[in-house]
Amino acid sequence: MFESIQTLVPSEWQGTFSFLTAPIAWVPQWHVRMVNFAWYGDSLSEVLLKRAFVLMPVFLVLAAMWSTMASLYTLPFRPNRGKFMTALLMGWWDTGRSIWLFWAGMVRLAVVVVGWAWATLRLVFQLVVAAIKGTFRSPLVLLDWTSRNYFKPGVPWVAFLGLMLWCAVEATIFMYTLSPTLSEVLAGITGYEPNAALMAPLLWLFLFLLIMGSFACIQVLSKAVQSRRVGEIVQMVFVELSVMFFEVIFLYRELIDAITPWIAQQTNEGLRLGLVSTLALASFGWVGVRGMTWFLFGRFGTPALLAVLARDTLKQDTQPFTTGPGATQPDLWRGPISALKEEVTWFKDEARTAFALLSLPVLQLFAAAVNMVVVVIRSRPLFQLPFTSLEEALAHTPRWATGEDARTIPGLEPTGAITPGGGAQ
């Protein structure tokens, strides 16, 4: 670079120019070699390592070298050469220390990242183990909680749900057995074939309510028998016989008619069911089905059904049951969610720590480079190095003043400087 400039200088001044540029004539070539060394490599891993750990320290050394060589031309004109040389040497001390702290900070960041990765793997392993344990323990915990709470006076939900399920199953069965007969009746009345997709849900809903009403009639008859009210017993027996007759004629008879061909086939046409035998089998079927379902869950679920429809509460004859101090409720989701909420603060703190570990070494290098340039201009550094925290680095950002610099050495403040209290000295 200086050779090309030297060609523009007159020949009688070229020797003087070479003498004056001798302190910095070697710096450009050395600058290029240092940048090439930090930027290029023989392999991809070497290139990445150099650009991550060598490039920025090389830039700092280049800035320090250019500042030092340029400051040599100002030595004859400086009043306090001893103070300037001391500040310059301290700048090189800060340069070397900042480079070392940069490498140490990168190593520290790598160690912290490895620690976080290991902690994350351990956390994932613990979560997997906890999930596996929870998969096997949750049914037991839920069963224990259910057993503690279900066997207390209250709504018999199992019997209630069993009653609803049975009514739905029975309504579905009779819907399929009654659909052909109902289709023929409606077709004979209207002259049009009814839509099965529309008729089936309506028929199922009708049968579902009808079967629930049958259980409700048995419940009222049971209460009348328990209270020994003869008039109500006679009335409910008549009602129950009417219900039985209706269900046998329209529901259970269709079920018996559906299995009549099978009976005839099994007896080689030796047994044919007539009207009386069909109604008798249908009546026995109704009594058997209602009896089994009533004594299994109907007598417990029907009062709950009537209470739900009437928006009433169930009355219990027994004393309330209380669980012991060891009774625990299942905590399947609240615990993990609470733990996750508690970890949010930890993740934020760790993110700040990672940002500080990544930013502080780089800011050290920038501050050291700025100090070398400022030492050449003002004979003293701008930043006090090293920075111990990211907050300290941000707090040392200078506030430039107009005119005379208000940030001076303590004890040498100019007259009229504004003090922190607000008064003029």
Image (cartoon, grey):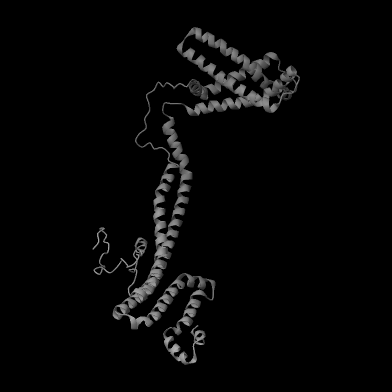
The quarter of the rendered structure image containing the C terminus is bottom left
Residue at 72 percent of width and 18 percent of height? 185
In the visual, does 180 lie left or right of 43? right
Where residue 154 appears, x then y in whole percent? 43, 26
Residue drawn at the location 73% of the way across and 22% of the way down: 264
Q: Which residue lies furthest to the bottom in this view?
A: 12
| Residue 115 on image: x %, y % | 42, 61
Left or right for 7, reference 278: left
Q: Where is residue 131 in the image (x, y as percent from the top left)?
A: 47, 47
Can residue 271 be seen at all in this image of the molecule?
Answer: no
Question: Can you say whether 342 is above or below 351 in the image?
Answer: above
| Residue at position x 44%, y 54% in the image | 123
Residue 133, given in percent of the width and then of the height, sits at: 46, 47
Q: In which quarter of the image is residue 103?
A: bottom left
- Relative height, residue 12 to residue 299 (above, below): below
User: Outermost residue toward the top?
Assistant: 231
- Of residues 204 and 419, which is closer to you in this image? 419
Query: In terms of depth relative to the viewer, which is nearer, 195 or 278?
Result: 195
**Residue at position x 48%, y 12% from top?**
224
**In the visual, does 387 lie left or right of 21?**
left
| Callout count | 0
Nearest to the observer: residue 147 or residue 58: 58
